[in-house]
Amino acid sequence: MTETYQGSCLCAAVRYELLSSPKAVSHCHCSHCRKGHGALFASYASVPRSALRIVDGRSEIKAYRSSESVLREFCQHCGATLFWSRSEGEFADWISVALGTLDTPFVPLKQKHLHVAGMAPWLELAEK
């Protein structure tokens, strides 16, 4: 049996379900993720596009193309970052979900920090 995870934006205008367990949990320190989240890093996990179901508020989702192949999606009301995905390449059939928007408890088996060379200079990571 596959576990289902629920999530939503800050104002709950957008609600979604993940029909498979999130994979490739990462905390990205690149400048685009830091700026997009307004935080030290952005925590994401990925699912196949077919495993993401928008339950409510599809019309409330706006998109921003942060680079030629990356699309970032957010709630137009509260501004909460929801998803990012690639439009081409090896992982074009996957979508990454902002883990902070999950409403269902999720504990990853493993996780990693990405682009640590671009992290905020005052952040200290034990595993640097």
Image (spheres, rainbow, N blue to C red):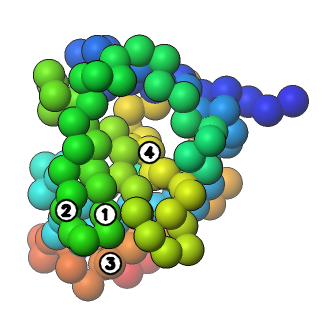
Residue located beneath label 2 in the image: 66
Locate the N terminus and report the quarter of the image it occupies.
top right
> Tag 3, which secondary structure?
loop
Of the residues under marks 3 and 4, which one precedes in the sequence?
A: 4
Question: Do the residues under discs 2 and 3 have CB atoms within 8 angstroms?
Answer: no
Nearest-to-viewer mark from 4 and 2: 2
* Separation of marks 1 and 2 at Cα, in angstroms: 6 Å
Mark 1: amino acid: Val
Going from the N terminus, do you reach mark 4 or mark 2 first? 2
Front position among marks 2 and 3: 2
Label 1, label 4: how many angstroms apart (C-alpha)?
A: 13 Å
Label 3 close to label 1 by CB (< 8 Å): no
Q: Is residue 79 above or below residue 120?
A: above
Marks 2 and 3, the one that precedes in the sequence:
2
First in sequence, mark 1 or 4: give its number: 1
Per the model, the C-alpha gap separating discs 3 and 1 is 16 Å
Question: Which residue is tagged 4?
Answer: 97
Left or right side of 70 for 93: right
- Residue 97 falls in image quadrant: top left
x, y percent for residue 69: 32, 69
Disc 3/disc 4 C-alpha distance (Å): 18 Å
Q: Amino acid at mark 3?
A: His
Tag 1 residue? 70
How far apart marks 2 and 3 lie (CA) works out to 16 Å
The residue located at (13%, 49%) in the rendering is 38
Question: In this view, which residue lies farthest toward the right?
Answer: 1
Check whether the beta carbons of the residues at disc 1 and disc 2 lie within 8 A of each other: yes
Task: Give the label on residue 115, or none.
Answer: 3
With respect to residue 43, does 103 lie above or below?
A: above
